[in-house]
Image (cartoon, rainbow, N blue to C red):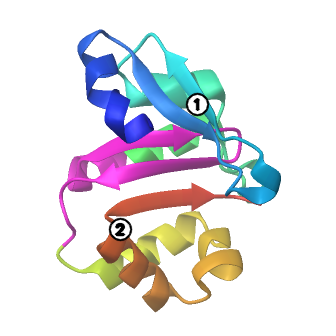
Amino acid sequence: MVFNLKDGFKKKGYTIFLLESNFNIGNKPDRVGVLKTTDKYSVLQQIGTDGINYNITNDSLITIIKRFDKQYSLELIGASGDWCEFLIHKEPKNWLTFAKEIYKVCPDVVDQGTETVEALAGEMKKTKRLYFWWD
């Protein structure tokens, strides 16, 4: 739903994004957020996304995202208290190097997710998505 609506919302000055994904568990629906801004950093600030159990405050996360955004042209598609997700519009020259950078910021995405940095690189290359999640 977010993918079908995001461009229309952006033209009107809004950002629509996934706020809660329930992964079809127990037929519980996902939740979508809408904010009157087209600034992804403002969305992250208003939601208060952080990786605080890794000493990543909201401000430091926004600084990290800005750095990656300059390199890879990121589009926010989801965010909540301890996670955020982006479409990658400019592919890295080396996906493994990129995955290693992500692992430094967000070990949980590998340690509790893909299990290896190489698998993370492959997943990002396949999906063109960047996902941060701090458990």
In magenta, the rendered stretch is 66-92
Residue 118 image offset from top left, x and y in percent: 44, 90
Crowd class of label 2 (few under 14; some 14 to 19; many from 20; radius 10 Å): few
SS category of the residue bearing label 1: strand
Task: Residue at 26% x, 27% y: name it.
Answer: 7
Q: Is residue 134 magenta?
A: no
From the image, tell me which residue sits under label 1: 32
Q: Secondary structure at mark 2?
A: helix
Give the mark nearer the N terminus: 1 vs 2: 1
Residue 101: quarter of image: bottom left
Left or right: 64, with 67 as reference point? right
Q: Position of residue 44 (x, y in %)?
A: 54, 31
Q: Is residue 104 above or below residue 90?
A: below
Tell me the quadrant of the picture where the N terminus can be found: top left
Q: x, y (%) of residue 37? A: 40, 14
Q: Label 2: which residue?
A: 127
Residue 92 appears in which quarter of the rendering? bottom left
Q: Give the residue at x 34% y 36%.
A: 4
